Amino acid sequence: MDENQAREIAQRYLVEQPAGPAPLALFDDAPDDHVWCYLFFWNTAAYVQTGDMAYSVGPGTGPIAVVKATGEAWALGSASFDAQLAAYARAHGIRIG
């Protein structure tokens, strides 16, 4: 799976989340590539467009991970991304490193 396909999956995942007070959007930056998955960062559309902290989603949100081999997507919490990715990989039989 290439980055563009994964971005489409992450965008669909983001749109499918319960509606909040403001529309959400992915950042246009290249995702973090973790060999077996991509991480896409997001925030409110207004924050992505302006960078104004008044529009930012508060702490506690993490990026959307998309598994390259399966297209599965899920949201990480704001705590250690590496620990969450390692736990997911172990639970799903994904070899890392």
Image: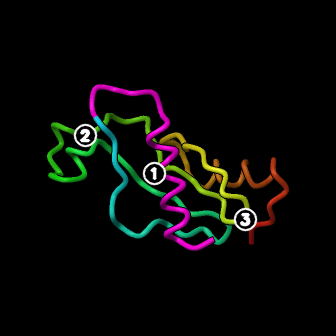
Point out the frontmost of discs 2 and 3.
3
Q: Horizontal placement of 88 versus 52: left or right?
A: right
**Which residue is painted at 48% across and 61% down in the image?**
7
State which quarter of the image contains the N terminus.
Answer: bottom right
Occupied quadrant, residue 54:
top left
Q: Are marks 2 and 3 in contact (CB under 8 Å)?
A: no
Q: Which residue is mark 1?
A: 11
Point out the frontmost of discs 2 and 1.
1
Q: Which residue is mark 2?
A: 56
Q: Which mark is residue 75?
A: none
70 up-or-down from 30: above or below: above
Residue 9 coordinates in the image, percent (x, y) = 54, 55
Dot 1: element? helix
Confirm whether the magenta stretch covers residue 14: yes
State which quarter of the image contains the C terminus.
Answer: bottom right
Looking at the rendered structure, the kind of residue marked 3 is Ala
Confirm whether the magenta stretch covers residue 69: no
**Which residue is painted at 47% across and 45% down in the image?**
62
Q: Which residue is mark 3?
A: 69
As measured in the structure, the alpha-carbon distance from the residue carrying label 1 to the one carrying label 3 is 18 Å
- First-in-chain label (2 vs 3): 2
Looking at the rendered structure, the kind of residue marked 2 is Ser
Residue 58 coordinates in the image, percent (x, y) = 32, 34
Which residues lie in the magenta part?
Answer: 1-22
Mark 1, other Cα within 10 Å: few <14 / some 14–19 / many ≥20: some
Looking at the rendered structure, the kind of residue marked 1 is Gln
